[in-house]
Image: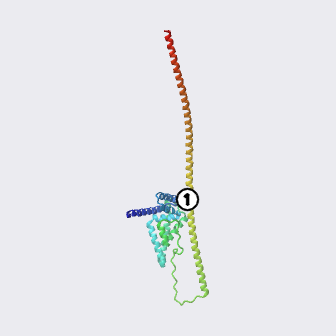
C-alpha cells in the first residue's frame, strides 16, 4: 500500500510539474496566440482526466503586450535579470538606510540599466514578430522600475508570468538622493503658537487627503487595467468562438452539399434500378413468348413430319 501511495504522490508531482511547464510555455507565447494555445493545453489536460490541471490552465489570463515583453526579457536574459534584481535589492537597502552617496550612484545605474533592458525587451519582441509601440515600451520601463522598488514586484517579474505591467510605488525615489537634514545649532525649543499648530494640522490633513486620493486613483487605475485586460480576453475569445462557428458553419454547408449530391446519386441509382428491373421483366416476357413460339413451332414441325411420313408410306 505504501508503494502504491508513493507512486500516486510521484504522479501528482509529475502532473504539477507538467502544469508549471505548460504555464511557462503559455506566458512565453505571443499574446495573439495565447488564447488558442491555452485552450489546446486545457483540452489536452481534460482529455487526460486531469480536471484540476485543466482548470488551472484555463484560468491563465492573456498578458498584455508589454507584460509579455517583460516576461520574455526575464526568460531570455537570465544573467541580466539576476544583476538587475541585485541592483534593486541594493537600491532598496540604500533607500532604507538613507545612504545619500550610495543612492545617488545606484540611481544613475538604474536609469542606464532600465533604458538598456527596455531596448532589449523591444528587440526580443521584434525578433518574435511583435513590435512594441512607444507606449508599450514605457510600460516595460514602468515594470522594470517597479521591480527595483518593490521586492514583491521583483519576485513576480522573475517568475516570468506577468499579466499586466507593474507600477512603481510613488514613495520610491525617482533618482535623486534624499536631502540631508539641515544642520542647525542647538537651541531651546520654543512652543508653537496656536495659529502655527493649526496651520501644521491643516497641512498634514491636506497631505493625508492627497495621499488617500492618490491611492484611490492608483487602485482605480489598476482595476481599470484589469477590466480592460479581461475585456480584451473576452473579445479575443469571442473572436475565436466566432471563427470556430464560421468554420463549423462552412463545414456544415460542405457536408450538406455532399449529402445532397449523394442523395441525387441515390435517386438516379434508384431510377436506373427501376429501369433495369423493368427492362428485365420485358425481356423475361419476350423470352417466355419466344419460348412459347418455339414450342409451338416444334409441335407443328413434328406434326408436319408425321403427316409427311404417313403420306409417304401410303404412296408406297
User: x%, y% of residue 262?
Assistant: 55, 43
Q: Residue at x 58, y 81 (%)?
A: 204
Q: Nearer the viewer, residue 307 or 244?
A: 307
Q: Residue at x 55, y 47 (%)?
A: 255
Q: Nearer the viewer, residue 257 or 237?
A: 257
User: x%, y% of residue 241?
Assistant: 56, 56
Q: Quadrant of residue 14?
A: bottom left
Q: Residue at x 61, y 83 (%)?
A: 199
- Circle 1: element type: helix
Q: In this rendering, does residue 233 appear at all?
A: yes
> Outermost residue toward the left?
3
Above or below: residue 25 compared with residue 182: above
Q: In this rendering, does residue 99 appear at all?
A: no
User: x%, y% of residue 296?
Assistant: 53, 22
In the image, taking residue 192 as reference, residue 123 lies left or right, namely left
What colour scheme has been applied to the protein in the rendered image? Answer: rainbow
> Outermost residue toward the right?
195
Q: How many marks?
A: 1
* Label 1 packing within 10 angstroms: few (<14), some (14-19), many (20+): some
> Outermost residue toward the bottom?
188
Residue denoted by label 1 = 237
Quadrant in which the N terminus is drawn: bottom left
Above or below: residue 271 compared with residue 255: above
Q: Nearer the viewer, residue 128 or 281?
A: 281
User: x%, y% of residue 268?
Assistant: 56, 38
Amino acid at each position: 500500500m505504501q508503494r502504491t501511495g508513493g507512486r500516486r504522490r510521484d504522479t501528482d508531482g509529475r502532473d504539477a510539474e507538467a502544469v508549471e511547464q505548460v504555464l511557462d510555455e503559455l506566458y512565453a507565447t505571443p499574446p495573439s496566440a495565447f488564447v488558442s494555445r491555452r485552450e489546446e493545453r486545457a483540452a489536452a489536460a481534460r482529455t487526460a482526466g486531469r480536471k484540476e490541471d485543466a482548470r488551472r490552465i484555463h484560468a491563465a489570463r492573456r498578458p498584455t503586450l508589454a507584460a509579455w515583453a517583460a516576461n520574455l526579457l526575464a526568460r531570455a536574459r537570465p544573467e541580466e535579470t539576476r544583476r538587475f534584481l541585485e541592483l534593486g535589492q541594493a537600491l532598496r537597502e540604500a533607500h532604507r538606510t538613507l545612504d545619500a552617496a550610495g543612492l545617488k550612484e545606484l540611481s544613475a545605474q538604474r536609469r542606464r540599466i532600465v533604458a538598456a533592458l527596455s531596448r532589449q525587451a523591444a528587440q526580443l519582441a521584434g525578433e518574435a514578430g511583435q513590435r512594441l509601440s512607444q507606449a508599450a515600451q514605457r510600460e516595460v520601463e514602468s515594470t522594470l522600475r517597479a521591480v527595483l522598488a518593490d521586492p514583491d514586484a521583483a519576485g513576480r517579474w522573475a517568475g516570468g508570468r506577468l499579466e499586466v505591467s507593474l507600477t512603481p510605488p510613488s514613495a520610491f525615489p525617482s533618482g535623486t538622493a534624499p536631502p540631508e537634514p539641515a544642520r542647525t545649532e542647538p537651541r531651546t525649543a520654543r512652543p508653537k503658537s496656536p495659529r502655527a499648530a493649526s496651520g501644521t494640522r491643516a497641512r498634514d490633513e491636506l497631505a493625508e487627503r492627497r495621499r488617500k486620493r492618490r491611492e484611490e486613483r492608483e487602485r482605480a487605475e489598476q482595476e481599470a487595467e484589469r477590466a480592460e485586460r479581461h475585456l480584451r480576453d473576452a473579445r479575443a475569445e469571442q473572436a475565436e468562438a466566432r471563427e470556430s462557428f464560421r468554420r463549423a458553419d462552412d463545414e456544415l454547408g460542405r457536408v450538406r452539399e455532399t449529402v445532397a449530391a449523394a442523395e441525387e446519386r441515390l435517386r438516379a441509382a434508384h431510377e436506373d434500378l427501376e429501369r433495369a428491373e423493368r427492362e428485365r421483366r420485358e425481356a423475361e416476357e419476350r423470352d417466355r413468348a419466344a419460348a412459347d413460339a418455339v414450342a409451338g413451332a416444334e409441335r407443328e414441325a413434328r406434326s408436319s413430319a408425321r403427316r409427311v411420313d404417313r403420306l409417304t408410306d401410303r404412296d408406297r
